[in-house]
Amino acid sequence: MSWVFLIAAGLCEIFYAAAMPRTEGFTRLWPSLFCGAFIASSMYLLSLATRTIPVGTAYAVWVGIGAVGTAVYGMLALGEDRSVARMACFGLILMGIGGLKLLTLRGE
């Protein structure tokens, strides 16, 4: 169940990162509340995940999900750079997440 919490925490991170520009420095109420709710949810879910997943692994996976997910959002919704080099870098992050998951399953 901890990995479900961790994935959900990463998804919440994507939502708050995507909403952050709309807050305009947290000067707009509703976008700021939306962003804050997802920040709090992400932290709570991450804390649940770290009950059984080592904190270093959980944090790295959480950041990786957020980074790659937010980048995908930026490319699809905001027209951000889609260069091969950028995609390769995000692919390396995904491979790192997969490797951490495998190592955790093996008990290392």
Image (cartoon, helix red, strand yellow):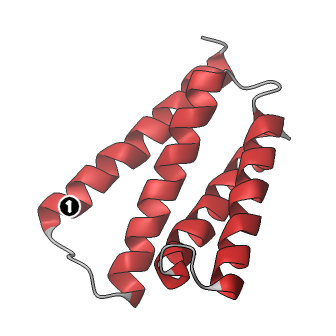
Which image quarter is the C terminus in? top right
Residue 64, x across and y down, in percent: 47, 47
Q: Dividing the picture into quarters, in which one does residue 39 lie?
A: bottom right
Viewer-side residue, 63 vs 98: 63
The residue under label 1 is 86
Which image quarter is the N terminus in? top right
Residue 106, x across and y down, in percent: 64, 17
22 is higher (above) or lower (below) than 60: below
Q: Residue at 41% of width from left, 88% of height from top?
A: 77
Viewer-side residue, 65 vs 38: 38
Residue 100, x across and y down, in percent: 52, 29
Q: Dividing the picture into quarters, in which one does residue 58 lie?
A: top right
Q: In the displayed structure, does residue 76 sit left or right of residue 18?
A: left
Q: Residue at 51% of width from left, 45% of height from top?
A: 63
Which residue ends up furthest to the front in the rendered image?
27
Residue type, label 1: Arg
107 is higher (above) or lower (below) than 20: above
Q: Secondary structure at mark 1?
A: helix
Circle 1 crowding by C-alpha within 10 Å: few under 14, some 14–19, many from 20: few
Residue 19, x across and y down, in percent: 56, 77
* Number of disc labels: 1
Q: Residue at 83% of width from left, 37% of height from top?
A: 48
Q: Residue at 67% of width from left, 24% of height from top?
A: 105
102 is higher (above) or lower (below) than 61: above
Q: In the displayed structure, does residue 44 sit left or right of residue 90?
A: right
